[in-house]
Amino acid sequence: MATLTKDMLINGIKDVKPLEELGKRLAEADKVQDRNNPNKWITKKAMSTSQIRKFFGAIKRIQADFDNLKGEIILLEPKLAYAVGKDKKESKIDEFYKELSPLIKEIKEDEKKFKNFVSIVEAIVAYHKVYGGE
């Protein structure tokens, strides 16, 4: 399932296809097996634009004052984890979290990696929107 790689943080985006696929997956509802009851199917709702925007806003705030706020990069991961725990609509924010969490942990306070991470998230947001994310 993982489509995002740590190489994207180091070398930048060389291929937008995985980002497009993730943005599209996040924008579409799916029927999935209930992890607590394999005989039951549930609908995973599309991730909402507001869920993405809250996270994106935190990223852009750090980007605007990187030297003073770079210590907050590590807090992006628990911020996403909180959003997953808060999600009562069974949306795909958990998939967003699973894809981004390893990248956030890899950034540390490296400015180049953070800039590439911002580009990755911007692309996901754009594709989410183009594929009907609301």
Image (tube, rainbow, N blue to C red):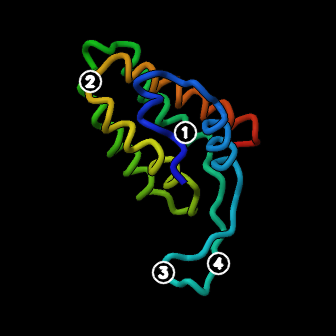
- Which residue is disc 2 drawn over? 109
The mark closer to the camera, 1 or 3, is 3
Between the C-alphas of marks 3 and 4, the distance is 10 Å
- Which amino acid, by three-letter code, is at mark 3? Asn
**Sooner in the amino-acid sequence: mark 2 or mark 4:** 4
| Horizontal relation, residue 78 to residue 86: left or right | left
Residue that mark 3 sits on: 36
Residue underneath mark 1: 52
Q: How crowded is mark 1: few (under 14 residues within 10 Å), some or many (20 or more)?
A: many
Task: Name the secondary structure under disc 3.
Answer: loop
Residue under circle 4?
41
Q: Residue 68: x and y, percent? A: 25, 15
Tag 1: residue type? Ile
Front position in the image: 114 or 14: 14
Dot 1 falls on a residue whose secondary structure is helix
Amino acid found under the numbered disc labelled 2: Glu
Q: In which quarter of the image is residue 22?
A: top right
Quadrant where the image shows the N terminus: bottom right
